[in-house]
Amino acid sequence: MHPLLLSTFHSNFSSSPLIAFAPGRINLIGEHTDYQEGFVFPAAVKQGIWVAIQKNDSPTCRLISADFGQEFSFDLDSLSPKKGHWANYAMGMCALMKQSGYEVMGFDMVIGGNIPVGSGLSSSAALSVGIGTAISALFDFNIPKKNLALYAQKSEHLYAGVKCGIMDPYASAFGVEGKALLLDCRSNTHREIPVQLGDYFLMLVNTKVKHTLADTAYNKRREACEESVKILQAEFPDIKTLRDLSVADLEKVELLLPESLFPKAKHIITECARVHKAAKALQSGDLITFGRLLDASHTSLSQDFEVSCPELDFLAQMATSMPEVLGSRMMGGGFGGCTINLVRTDFLEKFKSHIQIGYEKRFLKSPEFIPVEVSEGARIL
Ligand code: GAF
């Protein structure tokens, strides 16, 4: 439980609140493929967002962030985003629920979280899913998890301006302890695969950087993929997205696309193939193959999709140069955030000290190490 959640609630509002929790997520592999209706392989983590809520019998929603010590209120009749404000996630979820016919009424809410800032563990999806889970339970709406994930995605589009895919809120909503979700982002259905790593352990390394214009670059990558699809449809009339192409089509795709677009399309097509191979390797306990696929994913994201940055490339390269690390790659949208590393458990301390020393020397700042515990998805506590 968040240390300040209940005390903040009690000192500002009365009664005992209902409490919801929604986790952040990791992604084992399958990056930037979700908005091309491709395949991804995320899992929920232990860190997340707690939401305490009660009805207040008014048309006003009063929100407090326990971490920032800030208050905000909005009226349910005038939900307009305030640029860059954390409360947009609550307004967005309320607006989308109302549009779907749910009669959301006024509430008092306190929010607190423990997802490291800028880590790329998707605190915004956890926030939206946590708020959605809390409101749904408070008013007995029983909104299906899939719809909560879709509202969270749309809210990010409309209220934060990032044209993200479904992966992050889906993983936050559907996470299962000890299991990763092999998610098909066209049907929005998944298969659970146990994350059994034997003598190995997943360790995130946070670059602690977020390069400016990351959101703009994200939206541009999405547009580039959509542009490629339009060009390719002349020759492949049945494709709806790049997900519909396979590695066997790459030669033809290269002839059809301009040089500026081909590498990006290639990333999506090869990454979807890697997701399937990685899920198979993980399921059969072939961690060497699994790790190699992580490395290949990084190379593709860095060189073809161009969403890495010097800090991420440095960390991935340093990690893969250690024989005790089976795989390493940037995780999430890119331009900062974390790498995910498959490290032999008895080497973890040495891994951390080598990376710490190397990163500090090169970038004059310390990285942050975040151990991964694959955990359960959103729930009422
Ligand atoms: C961000 C987005 F929110 C996801 O939808 C996904 O595209 C990811 O970047 C990259 O795989 O987390």
Image: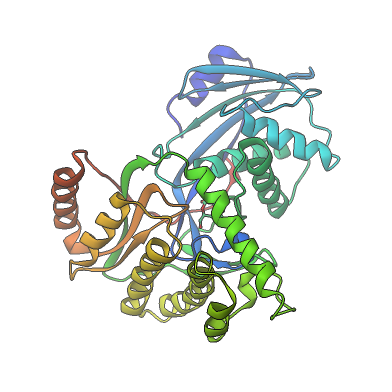
Establish if 1 lies above or below 106: below
Report which quarter residue 367 is drawn in: top left
Number of numbered discs on residues: 0
Above or below residue 42? Residue 115 is above
Residue 268: percent from left, percent from top? 53, 69
> Foreground residue, 153 or 347?
153
Q: Position of residue 277 (x, y in %)?
A: 46, 79
The colouring scheme, among rainbow, by chain, secondary structure or one colour, is rainbow
Left or right: residue 6 compared with residue 287:
right
Residue most extreme to the right? 101
Task: Name the outermost residue toward the bottom.
Answer: 248
Q: Quadrant of residue 170?
A: bottom right
Q: In this orientation, does residue 265 appear?
A: yes
Looking at the image, residue 213 sits to the left or right of residue 20; the answer is left
In the image, taking residue 167 as reference, residue 369 lies left or right, namely left
Q: Nearer the viewer, residue 176 or 67?
A: 67
* Residue 92 or residue 114, whichever sits in front: 92
For image coordinates 29% across by 51% down, the residue present is 310
Residue located at (42% from left, 67% from top): 195
Residue 294: quadrant of the picture = bottom left
Q: Is residue 301 above or below residue 215?
A: below
Q: Is residue 140 visible?
A: no
The residue at 74%/79% (across/down) is 238
Q: Quadrant of the C terminus?
A: top right
Residue drawn at 35 percent across, 79 percent down: 289
Q: Position of residue 50 (x, y in %)?
A: 53, 35
Image location (x, y in percent) of residue 39: 57, 68
Residue that lies at the very extreme toward the top in this rendered image = 11
